Amino acid sequence: MGQVEKKINIGLIRATVWKNTSRDGNEFRSVSLNKSYQKDGEWKNTNSLGEADIDKAIQVLEQARDYLNGSNSSEEIVA
């Protein structure tokens, strides 16, 4: 993965927009999705979502899509 460009959080669900460079020097963006959770007092991340997480995942992915389609603000979005 490349460099973090934007993090979008809703509750414990996060979409991260990554700025990458291909081997031939072309820039491209990618998006990762994960959920934070606490186990035995320690914070962890997973890419496995429960049924209750789906609506928040859709929302953060829609915000990531909107960002990639031209809303290039540098501020972090947290809801």
Image: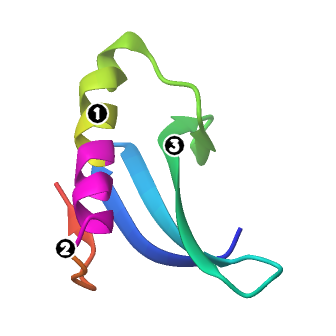
Report if residue 72 lies within the magenta region: no
Q: Position of residue 8 (x, y in %)?
A: 32, 59
Q: Residue 30's mark?
A: none
> Image quadrant for the N terminus?
bottom right
Q: Position of residue 33 (x, y in %)?
A: 50, 45
Residue type indicated by callout 1:
Ile
Mark 2 and mark 1: Cα distance apart in space:
18 Å
Q: Residue at x 31, y 16 (%)?
A: 52
Q: Position of residue 51 (x, y in %)?
A: 37, 11
Q: How many other residues sit within 10 Å of disc 2, few (<14), some (14-19) or many (≥20)?
A: few
Please report whichever mark, 2 or 3, sits nearer to the chain's N-terminal start: 3
Q: Position of residue 61 (x, y in %)?
A: 33, 45
Mark 2 and mark 3: Cα distance apart in space:
22 Å
Report if residue 67 lies within the magenta region: yes
Give the quarter of the image for residue 13. Answer: top left
- What colouring style does the render use? rainbow
Give the quarter of the image for residue 23. Answer: bottom right
- Which residue does the numbered mark 2 point to in the structure image? 71
Task: Assign a secondary structure to mark 3.
Answer: strand
Against 77, is 14 above or below? Answer: above
Please report whichever mark, 1 or 3, sits nearer to the chain's N-terminal start: 3
Instruction: Work out whether residue 74 or residue 70 is closer to the camera in this orientation and state it.
Output: 70
Against 1, is 56 above or below? Answer: above
Please report whichever mark, 2 or 1, sits nearer to the chain's N-terminal start: 1
- Which residue does the numbered mark 3 point to in the structure image? 34
Give the quarter of the image for residue 20. Answer: bottom right
Q: Residue at x 22, y 72 (%)?
A: 70
Q: Which stretch appears magenta? A: 61-70
- Which residue does the numbered mark 1 point to in the structure image? 58
Residue type indicated by callout 2:
Ser
Against 5, is 52 above or below? Answer: above
